């Protein structure tokens, strides 16, 4: 304290230039130097609920490979054709993706595929415009490059009904192959502005007549299609029922796939580095190595869930059967869309959707005056539809900021559903299927640990998972 010119006491300046107050006791800032703080563990904003990892039944894959044996299926899978666009009027087919059309599935002559792709020409359709009319001859095959189309039919009482929705990549008209006089059994109208690639049957026949390999492939496809199947496309098993007397009962057998799919465990890895000085001197009250490892494991688990959904080799979004994919009727996810998704399989155990897709579904429920229920899952109240919980998952992609997907899953080996794959009991295991192995100390005195998580996911039968695609999530403007 100093005395000013008037003789009154003035507060003295501290060495840092600030004015010190007259205090009667020790300040809290000074007292803190003699005590410690109450602190939390290191926090991490990137931790999510990870419902997929929690809800999946996990199978221990002791050999590192999981084989899914199935009954022989004679139904040829329907894929999606891909396109490239170099301008508003320059849309082209990626030739090798023509092998996604059922008649060309497995065909690998790229020269022939390129010639077929070159014969396709783009055609624009406006909303409400008719693409094909029921009852007219089938003279062209259509490949939808962009847009949404409604497949219409006549109901029992003469009313027009929407039978389904077609969207980007879907083929149309290839089922007429092998018919003597094919006619359209339904009408197709454009629901949005659409770009469609058109291949005349005359152009296909010209290529077909010049290519022996294409002829052999198509003949084999038609012979394969004529074999008897059940409603699921599997090779039929002859069973005699409803007979009387002593008729001769035919024999049969159940055929298996000769080349069943095998899933190898994938891995997510990182090297955790901790300086020995940190590990030795700064371990009170929390162990630095343990905290570093805990946060690293959290990040690995987040990556594992992303891989289970988005990995192109085994991820659920890329490996769901195209026959199990449907489009929304109008754009946003409605109760009708969710009911359609439920009706495609038995014992649906969970929906999985981006939080914004869930919000969009709730908006549609609000418009109709519906209140979705909730179910208790491990002590958590989870929103549900028809008693099936709807779990949020931010790792489902949002395309261009306005469309996403909703998944419906049946779970477990007993129900021929979806199962997670991992190996338990690996060396230096920290958590099931995850280990941290000491790699040594380098010349900079840095300790290294190799942290590895092994995982995969398998779809036991195609209808174990369904996907509602092109779900519009943008909120309408007020």
Image (cartoon, rainbow, N blue to C red):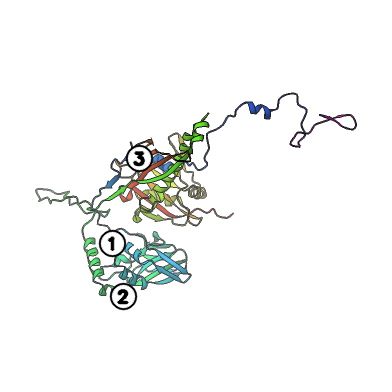
Q: Which residue is mark 2?
A: 202
Residue 96 or residue 451, whichever sits in front: 451
Which portion, as a residue range, is magenta?
2-18
Quarter occupied by the N terminus: top right
| Label annotation for residue 456 | none
Disc 2 to disc 1, C-alpha distance: 23 Å
In magenta segment, residue 265: no
Q: Is residue 383 visible?
A: no
Whether 460 is drawn above or below 107: the answer is above
Q: Is the residue under label 3 in contact with that under label 2 (CB below 8 Å)?
A: no
Q: Residue at x 31, y 66 (%)?
A: 174
State the residue in front, 142 or 132.
142
Provide the residue designation for mark 1.
106
The residue identified by callout 3 is 57
Q: Is residue 70 left or right of residue 49?
A: left
Dominant SS in magenta: loop
On screen, residue 58 above or below 281? below
Q: Earlier in the sequence, mark 2 or mark 3?
A: 3
Residue 110 percent location from the top left of the image: 31, 68
> Residue shown at 37%/41% (left/top)?
56
**Nearest to N terminus: mark 3 or mark 1:** 3
Q: Which image quarter holds the C terminus?
A: bottom right
Query: Alpha-carbon distance for marks 3 and 1?
Result: 33 Å
Q: Residue furthest right?
A: 6
Asked if one can make out residue 402 in the rendered structure from this viewpoint, the answer is yes
Number of other residues with Cα within 10 Å of mark 2, as a class: few under 14, some 14 to 19, many 20 or more: few
Q: Nearer the viewer, mark 2 or mark 1?
A: 1
Measured Cα–Cα span from mark 2 to mark 3: 52 Å
- Nearer the observer, 390 or 87: 87
| Callout 2–callout 1 Cβ contact below 8 Å | no
Could you tell me how many numbered marks the image carries? Answer: 3
């Amino acid at each position: 304290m100093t005395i000013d010119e008037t003789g009154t006491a003035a507060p003295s300046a501290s060495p840092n230039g600030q004015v010190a107050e007259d205090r009667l006791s020790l300040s809290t800032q000074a007292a803190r130097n003699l005590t410690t703080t109450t602190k939390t563990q290191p926090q991490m904003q990137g931790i999510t609920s990870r419902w997929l990892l929690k809800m999946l039944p996990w199978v221990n894959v002791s050999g590192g490979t999981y084989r899914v044996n199935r009954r022989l299926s004679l139904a040829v899978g329907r894929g999606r054709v891909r396109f490239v666009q170099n301008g508003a009027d320059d849309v082209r087919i990626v030739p090798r993706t023509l092998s996604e059309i059922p008649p060309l599935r497995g065909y690998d002559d790229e020269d022939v595929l390129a010639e077929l792709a070159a014969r396709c020409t783009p055609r624009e359709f406006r909303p409400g415009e008719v693409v094909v009319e029921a009852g007219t001859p089938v003279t062209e095959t259509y490949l939808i490059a962009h847009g949404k189309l409604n497949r219409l039919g006549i109901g029992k009482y003469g009313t027009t009904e929407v039978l389904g929705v077609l969207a980007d990549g879907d083929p149309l008209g290839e089922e007429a192959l092998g018919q003597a006089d094919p006619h359209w059994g339904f009408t197709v109208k454009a629901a949005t502005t659409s770009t469609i690639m058109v291949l005349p049957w005359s152009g296909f026949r010209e290529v077909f007549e010049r290519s022996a390999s294409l002829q052999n492939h198509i003949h084999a496809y038609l012979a394969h299609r004529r074999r008897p199947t059940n409603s699921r496309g599997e090779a039929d098993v002859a069973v005699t029922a409803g007979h009387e007397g002593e008729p001769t009962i035919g024999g049969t057998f159940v055929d298996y796939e000769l080349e069943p799919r095998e899933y190898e465990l994938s891995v997510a890895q990182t090297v955790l580095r901790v300086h020995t000085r940190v590990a030795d001197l700064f371990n009170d009250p929390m162990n630095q190595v343990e905290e570093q490892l805990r946060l690293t494991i959290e990040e690995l688990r987040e990556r594992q869930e992303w891989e289970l959904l988005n990995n192109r080799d085994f991820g659920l979004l890329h490996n769901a059967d195209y026959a199990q994919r449907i489009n929304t009727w109008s754009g946003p996810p409605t109760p009708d869309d969710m009911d359609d998704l439920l009706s495609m399989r038995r014992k649906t155990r969970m929906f999985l959707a981006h939080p914004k897709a869930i919000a969009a579904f709730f908006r549609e429920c609000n418009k109709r005056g519906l209140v979705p229920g909730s179910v208790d899952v491990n002590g958590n109240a989870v929103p549900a539809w028809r008693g099936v919980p709807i779990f949020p998952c931010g790792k489902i992609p949002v395309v261009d900021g306005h469309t996403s997907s909703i998944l419906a899953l049946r779970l477990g080996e007993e129900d021929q559903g979806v199962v997670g794959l991992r190996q338990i009991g690996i060396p230096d295991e920290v958590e099931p299927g995850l280990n941290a192995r000491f790699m040594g100390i380098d010349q900079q005195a840095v300790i290294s640990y190799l942290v590895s998580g092994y995982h995969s996911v398998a779809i036991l039968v195609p209808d174990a998972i369904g996907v509602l695609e092109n779900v519009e999530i943008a909120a309408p403007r007020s």
